[in-house]
Image (cartoon, grey):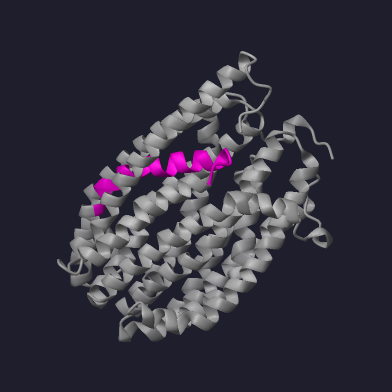
């Protein structure tokens, strides 16, 4: 299968910072609209249904859903990397086989998640100490949300396929449309029909289904090498192994990360509904940072994947440095804006003075430390684009997850306060950033030496592993 160069969407040439920004902005805007309809849920529920419903939609349920969905999203990142590398190397047949394997994986994974989430929701919420006045809302939300697991994973993998081949614009339009659907349905179901948490969950499922339908439509209608044929949707065992080799460490990394967040949420639950509601609202505010830094991460993963597949190793290293600088600058600017806004931003979600006071304390403590996470995201994403996923997973699990667990079990019981709990974030980010800088620098020196040996004819290998 052949397609013309003008339609390839490669990022293997051109000015690096421009290529990264052209790729970053559609992803960032897409993440913005993703965050917008999640935030809309919290705003409408908080304003119309109170802090118990806000806690249910944005508290423990969000952490548990991220724990389950994060594994499969991380696993699917292996497919994105494989497709980007095949696409950069112009292996069109392999691209097509990988697309069908990825979609099959999303359907199977979504079905498993749907059953697990629906059946285990009550037990999981009780195990994490969800307050009694919140748990009924939370069970309802999680069970309805579980019905949208398959379309959610289909959209995530489908959007990843499009980004892997350099198309970051259409996933943006899909999210804008689904965000509009979600907002309209939120207003209808919650503000007008008064369905409360049920309305928010139903609106979310329907909007996720809309985005999945759109991404499937594009994949099935294209004439390029990534065209999807429903009758060919099946798992290729060889490609599945490659996807697991790269994606499984990312999935396990997400699981470990979210396990630590579940334990943090459990500790916050013990502080009462005000603290849970404040933490839920803060989660929507700091989502501005996470959607930005994740967009940089996706951009550099695809950039590295395509250039690595095309054997443009020098361009890979320059791209990582440029992306690191841009991400650090953007993080510093966002942190300044959020600190200047302070507690005023919480009035968007709720009017309760106690909740706003607690949330403001969290904001002033954590927002200035966002900069300590930048190196983790950029280096980890770049390494994944090169196919190096296992070591970054281990470093993240040890540096972030391992330290947080030690902190939560050893320090928090001695000083049981919200400040002590959230302190685990900046300290673990700083430790892990240092580890990544050391590993990436040493890895680059080793690869550079190997390439010099190859150029000098001291080895018969023509590729850098």
Q: In the shown orientation, is residue 153 left or right of residue 230?
A: left
Q: Which residue is drawn at 60% across and 37% down?
A: 305
- Image label count: 0
Residue 277 % position (x, y): 29, 71
Residue 383 % position (x, y): 51, 39
Residue 450 % position (x, y): 56, 23
For this orientation, the residue located farthest to the front is 458
Residue 202 appearing in the image: no
Q: Residue at x 54, y 29 (%)?
A: 316
Residue 410 % position (x, y): 22, 64
Residue 358 appearing in the image: yes
For this orientation, the residue located farthest to the top is 456
Compared with 424, 110 (above or below) is below
Q: In the shown orientation, is residue 151 left or right of residue 47?
A: right
Region of the chain picked out in magenta, as a range: 366-389
Compared with 80, 452 (above or below) is above
Q: Which residue is drawn at 43% across and 83% down?
A: 123
Quadrant in which the C terminus appears: top right
Magenta run includes residue 227: no
Main SS type for the magenta part? helix
Quadrant in which the N terminus appears: top right
């Amino acid at each position: 299968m052949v397609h013309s160069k003008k339609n390839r969407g490669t990022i293997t040439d051109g000015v690096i910072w421009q290529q990264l920004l052209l790729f970053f902005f559609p992803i960032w805007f897409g993440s913005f609209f993703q965050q917008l309809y999640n935030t809309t849920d919290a705003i409408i529920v908080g304003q119309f249904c109170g802090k118990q419903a806000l806690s249910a939609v944005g508290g423990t349920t969000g952490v548990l859903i991220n724990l389950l969905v994060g594994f499969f999203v991380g696993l699917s990142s292996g497919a994105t990397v494989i497709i980007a590398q095949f696409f950069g190397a112009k292996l069109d047949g392999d691209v097509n086989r990988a697309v069908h394997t990825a979609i099959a994986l999303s359907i199977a994974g979504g079905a498993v998640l749907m059953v697990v989430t629906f059946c285990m929701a009550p037990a999981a919420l009780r195990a994490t100490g969800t307050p009694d006045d919140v748990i009924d809302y939370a069970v309802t939300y999680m069970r309805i949300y579980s019905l949208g697991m398959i379309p959610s994973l289909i959209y995530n993998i489908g959007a990843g396929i499009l980004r892997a081949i350099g198309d970051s614009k259409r996933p943006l339009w899909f999210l804008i449309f689904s965000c509009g659907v979600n907002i309209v349905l939120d207003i209808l179901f919650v503000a007008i029909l008064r369905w409360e948490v049920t309305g928010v969950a139903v609106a979310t499922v329907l909007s996720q289904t809309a985005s999945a339908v759109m991404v499937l439509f594009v994949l099935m209608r294209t004439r390029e090498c990534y065209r999807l044929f429903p009758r060919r949707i099946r798992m290729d065992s060889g490609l599945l192994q490659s996807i697991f080799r790269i994606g499984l460490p990312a999935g396990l990394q997400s699981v470990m990360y979210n396990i630590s967040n579940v334990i943090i949420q459990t500790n916050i639950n013990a502080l009462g509904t005000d603290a849970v509601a404040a933490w839920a609202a803060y989660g929507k505010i700091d989502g501005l940072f996470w959607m930005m830094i994740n967009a940089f991460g996706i951009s550099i993963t695809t950039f590295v994947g395509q250039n690595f597949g095309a054997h443009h190793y020098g361009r890979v290293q320059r791209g990582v440095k440029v992306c690191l600088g841009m991400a650090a600058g953007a993080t510093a600017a966002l942190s300044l804006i959020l600190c200047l806004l302070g507690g005023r931003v919480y009035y968007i979600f709720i009017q309760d003075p106690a909740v706003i006071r607690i949330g403001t304390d969290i904001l002033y403590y954590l927002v200035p430390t966002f900069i300590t996470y930048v190196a983790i995201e950029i280096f980890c994403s770049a390494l994944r684009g090169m196919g190096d996923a296992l070591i970054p997973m281990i470093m993240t699990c040890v540096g972030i997850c391992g330290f947080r667990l030690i902190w939560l079990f050893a320090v928090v019981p001695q000083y049981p306060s919200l400040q002590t709990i959230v302190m685990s974030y900046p300290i673990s980010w700083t430790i892990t950033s240092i580890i990544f800088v050391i590993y990436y620098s040493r890895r680059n020196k080793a690869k550079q030496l190997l390439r010099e040996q190859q150029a000098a004819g001291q080895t018969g290998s023509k590729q850098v592993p």
